[in-house]
Image (cartoon, rainbow, N blue to C red):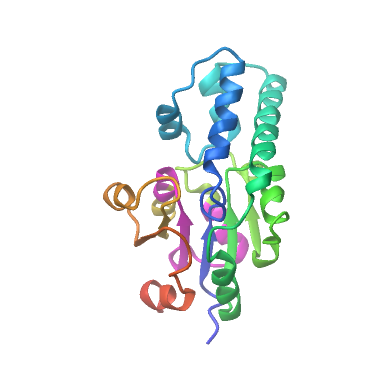
Amino acid sequence: MSYLDRAFIFDMDGTLVDNMRYHTEAWRILIEENGFEFDEHKFLVETAGQTNREIIPGVFGAMSNERLSELALRKEELYRERYLPYRAPVRGLVEFLDGARNLGVKMAVSTAASPANMAFILDGLDLRKYFGAITTAADVKRGKPDPEIFLLSAERLGVSPEKSIVFEDAFFGFEAAKRAGMLSIGLSTVNSGDDIMQTAIVEEVHADYANMRPDQLIARYLPF
């Protein structure tokens, strides 16, 4: 049986790779080297799923587009430097993607990351081949929790939102999926499974993909 009218839509950071600690460290360095204090908990709660062009003015205040671009480039260089020695897919991901592809499920990535960071992960780990659509911060006006990025990915795949399952790690991402009319599977790479189940609207929460099977998820949540 082929499932060409079903879609799996993946966030990237914290979902395909367990890299959020390296993003956080890069933000800490950037913020502190510009003379601001870094409150990790407050920062993560307020910015998860947002784009750099949303985060940076919120932290540093109003600025020129040139200065915003300069700070964004510096932050992403810091992140890639620190994560490169540890770059790896979440456990079980490649096997899960292989299984979904064999079933004919359409797949996309919807990430608030820049195109350079997207390529750093998807090309660096040879994951791009699995995805029929890739949507980044450069493609949308608003980051999560706005549903725009998920809806655009579904549109690019030619699959309706109600036939799509989102894989996410962040609360803003879960909210965006709900607003898009999609179901969510949570990854507890950043937030605890208990926190996700109590706070977000998700169908299931997993530490990784090792115990997930694409055929079972479809049978459970998208049978028709």
The vertical placement of 107 against 174, above or below, is below
Q: Which residue is outermost to the bottom? A: 1
User: Start and end of the magenta stretch?
Assistant: 150-175
Relative placement, left or right, of 182 versus 103 is left
Residue 124 appears in the picture as rendered: yes
Question: Percent from the top left, x then y, of residue 62?
Answer: 58, 16
Question: Percent from the top left, x then y, of residue 177?
Answer: 43, 53
**Magenta stretch containing residue 174, yes or no?**
yes
Q: Camera-side residue: 74 or 64?
A: 74
The vertical placement of 101 against 119, above or below, is below
Question: Percent from the top left, x then y, of residue 22?
Answer: 57, 38
Q: Camera-side residue: 115 or 23?
A: 23
Give the residue drawn at x 72%, y 43%. Answer: 116
**Magenta stretch containing residue 119, yes or no?**
no
Q: Which residue is outermost to the top? A: 35
The vertical placement of 101 against 72, above or below, is below
Q: Main secondary structure of the magenta part?
A: helix
Q: Toward which corner of the image does residue 172 lie, by quadrant?
A: top left
Q: Toward which corner of the image does residue 202 lie, by quadrant?
A: bottom left
Relative placement, left or right, of 89 versus 117 is left
Give the residue drawn at x 69%, y 22%. Answer: 65
Give the residue drawn at x 64%, y 42%. Answer: 83
Q: Which residue is outermost to the front? A: 85
Q: Camera-side residue: 158 or 171?
A: 171
Relative placement, left or right, of 17 versus 73 is left
The vertical placement of 216 against 60, above or below, is below
Question: Percent from the top left, x then y, of residue 147?
Answer: 48, 48
Quadrant containing the C terminus is: bottom left
